[in-house]
Amino acid sequence: MGVAFILLSGIGVIFLPTTAKLAYENGSNLITVAFARGVIATLVLLLVALVIRQSLKLPRELLRPSIIAGIGGAFFVYGIYGAITSIQISLAILILYLYPMVLALYEHVSGSIRVGVAQWIWAIAAGGGLALILGVKFDQINFFGISLAMLAMLASVVITVTNVRVATTVGSLVSNLYMSLWGTLIFSLVLLLVGEFAQPQTLTGQIALFGNGIAYCLAWVAFFAGARILGATRASMITLIEPPTAALVAWLIFGETFSGLQWVGFATVLVSLLMFEVLARAE
């Protein structure tokens, strides 16, 4: 069940950068997309919570980690949405998906979990396979874009560490509702002070903007539902299957072709994740 939630989360993750870029290309801007994403996500999660009669109470001791997760969420959105305007989406995704390794290192050092040498080898191998799949071209490097992607990656670690604690107590739906709410308040302030609201000028852009908010809900709610079952590090490591899955869908549905090196990357990621999971279960 935990793995199923993580795979469901991957569907949302696949559409996050693409819908944001579509909104940009149709007349919107970063702050508008970030603000609208927060409003849509907050309203959708609130509506679902009310329909299923979910308690919205947030214990006082969880207020601080919830707010930190919300700030992390704002940095994540700004980082990844800003990165895709400066560098290739593939490079931004590759940098973002370094976060499972950073999270594993943090939890290993803090003593929360123990990651063996063999698991580190398979984790690094999965990252290498991901680089092969994405076919990133490093000759077109924009250091500002890379910095934004790194910001999003580090923000993902902060979100996972803090919000998984909240989700464990109040549930994934409510924890992400509050995380979205705090982020929305931050972008509301930014929009009022320095931003310009730029609504997409086409129906395609408007649909992409709405879809971005839905994708954000699905990605985080499903991820933390899975993390409650598997633990943060195992859940985040399984998310490395998301880019290969997106590529395989493109191959099956749209007939996209891949080089022999990219197929090697597919095999490397799948085998590496399988071995990491086997070793994690053995612990």
Image (cartoon, helix red, strand yellow):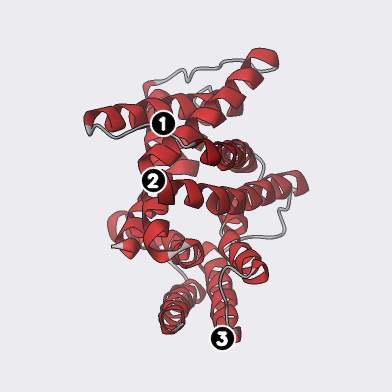
Q: Is residue 10 above or below residue 202?
A: below
Gap in Å between the C-alphas at discs 3 and 2? 31 Å
Tell me the distance, in whole angstroms, between the alpha carbons under discs 3 and 1.
39 Å
Q: Residues within 10 Å of mark 1 (few under 14, many from 20)?
A: many
Q: Which mark is residue 172?
A: 2
- Foreground disc of the pair 3, 2: 2
Q: Earlier in the sequence, mark 1 or mark 2?
A: 1
On residue 41, which mark appears?
1
Kindly identify which numbered label has been placed on residue 118: 3
Amino acid type, callout 3: Ala
Q: Along the polypeptide, which appears first: circle 3 or circle 1?
A: 1
Amino acid at circle 2: Ser
**What is the C-alpha distance between the residues marked 1 and 2?**
13 Å
Identify residue type, mark 1: Ala
Q: Is residue 218 visible?
A: no
Indicate the position of residue 218 as horizontal and vertical percent values. 36, 43
Image coordinates for residue 268, horizontal then vertical, percent: 48, 78
Most foreground residue, 255 or 118: 118
What residue is rendered at 50% in x and 43% in y?
17
Quadrant of res 72: top right
Q: Is residue 167 visible?
A: yes
User: Which comes before the other along the chain, label 3 or label 2?
Assistant: 3
**Callout 1 secondary element:** helix
Q: Are marks 3 and 2 in contact (CB under 8 Å)?
A: no
Q: Give coordinates of residue 213: x percent, y percent.
A: 42, 33
Of 8 and 86, the residue lying toward us: 8
